Every structure is written in structure tokens, then in C-alpha cells.
Amino acid sequence: MIAVTRTSRGLVRPKNEDSILVREPDLYAIADGMGGADAGEVASYEAVQQLARLDLSGVPRKEILAALEHGIQNINRKIWELSQDKPNFNGMGTTLTAVYLPDARSAFVGHVGDSRIYVLQEGQLRQVTSDHSYVAELVRQKQMTQEEADQSDQKHMITRAIGVEEAVEVDTFEVLLEGAQKLLICSDGLTNMISEAEIERLLGYKNLDRLADGLLDGAITAGGEDNISFIVIDLEAVK
């Protein structure tokens, strides 16, 4: 087993608007939907379904990031067009955080929104994505501390999303995986509930099911205030 995943609507939200893509061994993604009625779950579902059809296997390594960005831009445009065609889908959108893993050397990332990617590397956890959110931007500009951002009632306001506009800016980059043990892709329903210190501790488990149950149970026990979704990839199993 290379990857393990969990998803839950949590204890507060009436439905689960997160969607997950696990296409072993090479493509993984989390999409956290937003919008009224059923629109959020439609946007996230469409994002991962369309991403699943993206074939990067024949793309030269130096062109992978450009191809991944092009693919996500196409997904954005299709979801935006869907939101224009159906009035009950107006304003819908989703985060989309994707990892293409052609081998154990590196991960290629495409990222829009405030879902996150973490890498456990040589026993240390580090976040490799930047949140596209209002409070994260204030933290980057040193107008707010991270502690204030964590407590802010505006922390769910994102500044970029798939499907909200006809075009979107996509963060793309390569993450070198030398010495890495685990890779975590997750919605903010996990990271708003569990500290990074606790995530780091749980990612140290060798048993992936025990690890995943610990993450989900921790988020639920802390209040489960949002949908909770994540994928954990065992990078040592990829090698």
C-alpha cells in the first residue's frame, strides 16, 4: 500500500463538500468545495474527476509543471463555464491541491486555495504550499501574527479558488523528496483542528491505517468543525 485516505463531513457541517483523488501510483489531489446548495460538492467533484483524466506519463520531466498548470487551468475554465450555465451553480468554487509523483525523487505540485501539502522529511514536518487566504496574506505582510490568524473568524476566506473566475493563478513547483518518509495532502478541516506538532507525531507511525485513524479521530475529537479530508502517501513504499 502506497497511500491511505480518510474523509468525513465532521460534526458541524450538514454535508461533505470535499473530494479526493487517489490514482496510484502517480496522481493525488484534495478539493475542498465552496458555494451554496449543492454547488460546493459539484465543484470539488468535477475538479478531481477532470484531473483524474490528466495523463502526464509521456511528458518530459522539464515540462511537467507547465503541463500540470495547463491542465488545472482547463479544469478551472470548465467549472467556471458550468457555473455560468446553471444559475444554482453561480459562485461555486473549490480549492485544488494536486501532487504528481512519477518516482521517488520528487513531487510536482499544482496548488490553488488553502488546502495544504506537508512533507515529513528526516523526521521533521514542513508545509510546502502557501495558503491562498486573506489571513495568510496578512501574516506574509507581517500585519498579523500566525497566532492571530489561527484565531481569526476570517481564516476561511480564500483569495484564490478553482471555478470562480475564467482564469486562475496556479502555484506550481517541484518538491525534492530525498530523505522524505511521508507526504500529506489535506483540507483545512484537518489543519484547523490539529496542531502541526500532533500531525508530525502521527505521521511517524509506520502503520498507515493507524496513522490515518489517529489524524481523523484527532480532528473529530477537537470539534470536527469542518469537513475533514486527507491523503497520506508512504514515500518509502514508492522507492
Image: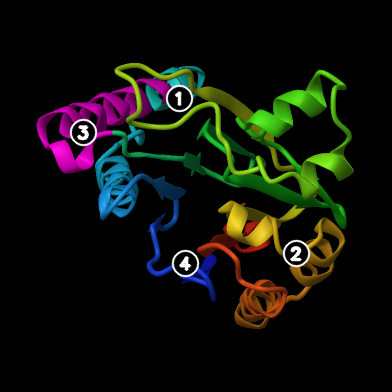
Say which of marks 3 and 1 sits in front. Answer: 3
Say which of marks 4 and 2 sits in front. Answer: 4
Sequence-first tag of 4 and 1:
4
Badge 1 crowding class, 10 Å Cα cut-off, few under 14, some 14 to 19, many 20 or more, is many
As drawn, the label of residue 64 is 1
Q: Nearer the viewer, residue 222 or 7?
A: 222
> Which quadrant would residue 214 be assigned to in this image?
bottom right
Badge 2 crowding class, 10 Å Cα cut-off, few under 14, some 14 to 19, many 20 or more, is some
Sequence-first tag of 4 and 2:
4
The residue drawn where x is 31% and y is 54% is 41
Residue 166 horizontal/vertical position (percent): 29, 18
Say which of marks 4 and 1 sits in front. Answer: 4
Amino acid at circle 4: Arg
Q: Main secondary structure of the magenta part?
A: helix
Amino acid at circle 2: Ile
Amino acid at circle 1: Ile
Secondary element at image label 3: helix
Q: Nearer the viewer, residue 142 or 105?
A: 142
- Residue 185 in view: yes
Sequence-first tag of 2 and 3:
3
Secondary element at image label 2: loop
Residue 109 horizontal/vertical position (percent): 55, 34
User: Relative to 6, is 81 on the left or the right?
Assistant: left
- The residue stretch that appears in magenta: 69-90
